[in-house]
Image: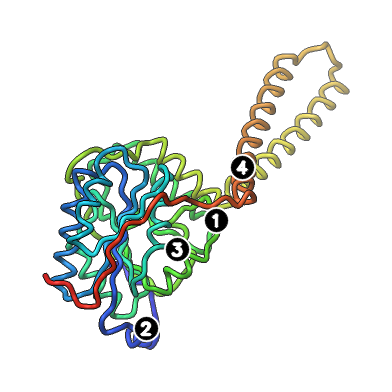
Amino acid sequence: MSEEFVPPYLLGLHAAERPADPLVSCVVPAYNEAANIVPLLETLHRILGGLGLRHELIVVDDGSRDATVELVLGQVDRLPLTLVQLSRNFGKEIALSAGIDHAKGDVAVLIDGDFQHPPELVPEFLEHWRRGYDMVFSVRADREGESASKRWFTRAFYALLNVGSPLKIPENTQDFRVLDRRVLEALRAMPERNRFMKGLYNWVGFTRLAVVSRTDERRAGESSFNFWRLFGLALTGLTSFSNVPLRVWSIAGGVVSLASILYAFWVAMDTLIWGNDVAGWPTLTVGIMFLGGVQLLSIGVLGEYIGRIYAEVKQRPAYFVSRVVSRRPGADKPAA
């Protein structure tokens, strides 16, 4: 457990504000999780019911192509369940945002639909919330089972993201977390379309507690989150929360300019002292190619930022919902 310093009186104030009989919203983003979704919902219902907590289970279907929606609809009459079906696949970050928008509870639990986030940790997270923490989140204990290239890429991403940033995002942090109502309202107020949720969780602040926990294997099926999706998410995170790429190319431009000035001085001295026999065309060719490559690469970095600015300026909705099917949770506590 990694605990940021929070004044005890502040935790006490927050703990005193916690409702005696809270409504817990469980947000589960799902994409092709037909083999996992029903067992997960039943597990969450059993755990929260065993604690005597009122709860709602919110499944956000992110354009699944298997039987996920059909199976979830089959549970609406027996579980306090809401299905939010998006009009297409928008990605996990948007699916989480849609779930947060539809959560009605005093506290929300964000958990993946594949059992990689252990549901049995939810009571511990909720207990920390009762102690006064507004956000309790999971940090991976290790990355066993992942390729060396993915581990290296992840370390490099967090190192680059946190360079010069006053708000450090903990490495290996996960979306598995508990959020107080005030955090949900803060996240809803964030208007950006290119959403990097781990950065947004960190940016809003509030009292936070990191809990180091294991990450299990998927119960069934295969993950659709491949390297290119990870790379795209990393680009979104960098361009949303870091100016380092722009600063790198500013420094690179300064270094190249200084080198050019020094080289021009050397050429001038060489010509004045030893004359000019029309030599140096290989150097000229290499220099032109090098500078052309640097310019194209820097334009590409600028293009990533400008493209995201363009997406924000258009102000399109972050997602569309094709339908919402729910059974309103009753006022009575559910049976275990």
**40 w.r.t. 1: above or below:** above
Question: Marks 3 and 4: CB-CB under 8 Å?
Answer: no
* Distance Cα–Cα, label 2 vs label 3: 19 Å
Determine which residue is flagged by label 3.
Answer: 202
Amino acid marked by disc 3? Asn
**120 w.r.t. 227: above or below:** below
Q: Residue at x 74, y 37 (%)?
A: 257
Determine which residue is flagged by label 4.
Answer: 307
Amino acid marked by disc 4? Gly
The quarter of the rendered structure image containing the N terminus is bottom left
Q: Residue at x 70, y 36 (%)?
A: 256
Determine which residue is flagged by label 2.
Answer: 14
* Distance Cα–Cα, label 4 vs label 2: 41 Å
Label 1, residues with CA under 10 Å away: few <14, some 14-19, many ≥20: some
Disc 4 is placed on an element classified as helix
Q: Can residue 138 be seen in the rendering of this structure? A: no
* Tag shown at residue 192: 1
Camera-nearest residue between 156 and 108:
108
Q: How many marks?
A: 4
Question: Marks 2 and 3: CB-CB under 8 Å?
Answer: no
* Distance Cα–Cα, label 3 vs label 4: 24 Å
